[in-house]
Image (spheres, grey):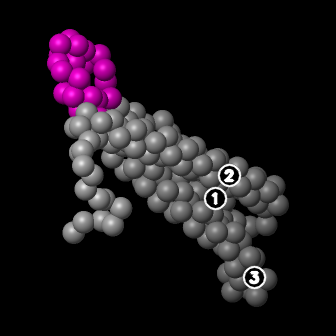
Amino acid sequence: MRLPFLQKSSEPLLPIEQLKLVHAEVDRQRTAINQRMGNMHTRAAILVTASGVYSTVQANNWVSGWQFISISLSIVAAVIGLWSMRPSPGTDANATLSFKERLIADPYSTEYSIVEDSMDGLVDDLDRIEKAARLIVWGYGILVLAWLAMPVTVGLMSAHII
C-alpha cells in the first residue's frame, strides 16, 4: 500500500539523505520523550507530596489504631512515587565505543550505526516512560484508597461496628 503523500519523483533521495531524515526524526522523538519523562517526574513529585501531607495530617489527628491503614496506604503511595522517579540508566548512542571504526567507515555506515544506536535508546526510553506512567497511576489509586479508608474507618467506629 502506498501512502498518498508518497509520490514518485523524478529523482529519488540518496540513501544518506533518507538516513539523515530518519536521524532527525529519532532525535525529535527522543526530545519529546525526555519532556514526557520530566512531566512524569512532576506527577510523581505531586504524588509524593500529597501522600506525605495526608499521612502527616492523619498522624497528627490520631483517633484510633484503624487510621494506621490509611496512613500505611499513603506511605505506600509515596514510596511508589519515589520509586517512579528513581534514576535509571538508559541505552544511548555511545560514540566512543566504536570511534575508530566510525572514523574510517564511509559516511552512510557511520550515520547508520549512530541512528541504530539512537533508535535502541528511543525504544528503551519509551519502555521506561510506560513503566513510570503505570507506577504513577497505581500510586494515585492507592492514595485515593488511603483517602477513602479514613472516613470508612471513622464511620464504622462511630457506628460501633469496629
Q: Are marks 3 and 2 in contact (CB under 8 Å)?
A: no
Q: In this orientation, which residue lies closer to the viewer: 136 or 158?
A: 136
Q: Nearer the viewer, mark 3 or mark 2?
A: 2
| Residue 31 x, y percent position in the rendering | 49, 40
Residue drawn at x 48%, y 46% is 33
Q: Amino acid at mark 1?
A: Ser
Mark 3, secondary structure of its residue: helix
Which numbered disc flags the more N-terminal residue, 3 or 1?
A: 1
Which callout, 2 or 1, points at the residue further toward the start of the chain? 2
The dot on residue 46 is 2
Which residue is label 3 attached to?
155
Please identify the quadrant where the N terminus is shown.
Answer: bottom left
Report whether 66 appears left or right of 99: right
Neighbours of disc 3 within 10 Å: few (<14), some (14-19), many (20+): few
Read off the residue under disc 1: 74
Residue nearest the viewer, comparing 106 with 146: 106
Q: Secondary structure at mark 1?
A: helix
Q: Say which of 6 and 158 sits in front.
A: 6
Residue at 55% x, 44% y: name it.
35
Measured from the top left, where is residue 15 in percent x and y? Answer: 22, 37
Residue bounds of the magenta highlight: 93-118
Answer with mark 3 or mark 2, whichever residue precedes in sequence: 2
* Predominant SS of the magenta segment: helix
